[in-house]
Amino acid sequence: MRERKEWINSRKSKVNACSLHSEYIIPADQPFPDYYKQKKALTQAKKEYPSLKRVQSQVLQEVIGRLDKAFNFFWKRSFGFPRFKKYGQYRSINFPQFKDNPITGY
């Protein structure tokens, strides 16, 4: 366990700490956070991580929706715990609406 903590402390981003902390985040007697609780937590995450402000909020909400859908399938069908995609495997994002052309910028 000490080796894992040292490894996590050596990383720059808190995202790498998920493997250690995810086991203890939600107690067993509490319900899993749903889509709406996660959307509410998104505003706090934008304050903590200013780089999230560069992404459109609807795109981030779409990703939260995908995650919620994966966990709902996990609870209903019991296929297995959802796995996070590695860098480069997440191949698409949805832009529900946008003013400017996302490719050219105008």
Image (cartoon, rainbow, N blue to C red):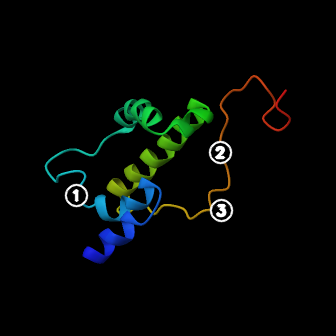
User: 52 or 12: which is nearer to us?
Assistant: 12
Q: Is residue 59 above or below residue 71?
A: above
Can I make out residue 43 in this image?
yes
Residue at the (44%, 52%) spot, across then down: 70
* SS under mark 1: loop
Residue tagged 3:
88
Q: Is residue 90 above or below residue 2?
A: above
User: 47 or 105: which is nearer to us?
Assistant: 47
Q: Position of residue 97 (x, y in %)?
A: 68, 27
Return the residue found at the far top.
Answer: 99
**C-alpha separation, residue under disc 3 versus residue under disc 1:** 28 Å
Q: Position of residue 62 (x, y in %)?
A: 55, 38
Indicate the quadrant where residue 96 lies.
top right
Q: In the picture provided, is 17 more to the left or to the right than 21?
A: right
Mark found first going from the N terminus, 2 or 1:
1
Return the residue found at the far left.
Answer: 29
User: 6 or 29: which is nearer to us?
Assistant: 6
Q: Amino acid at mark 3?
A: Gly
Q: Amino acid at mark 2?
A: Ile
Does the residue at mark 3 contact the one at mark 1 (Cβ under 8 Å)?
no
**Where the N terminus falls, by quadrant?**
bottom left
**C-alpha separation, residue under disc 2 versus residue under disc 1:** 30 Å
Can I make out residue 80 in this image?
no
Residue tagged 1:
24
Mark 2 crowdedness (10 Å alpha carbons): few <14, some 14-19, many ≥20: few
Q: Is residue 33 above or below residue 84?
A: above
Residue at the (43%, 61%) spot, across then down: 16
Q: Position of residue 81 (x, y in %)?
A: 37, 63
Q: Amino acid at mark 1?
A: Tyr
Which mark, by number, is residue 93?
Answer: 2
Does the residue at mark 2 contact the one at mark 1 (Cβ under 8 Å)?
no
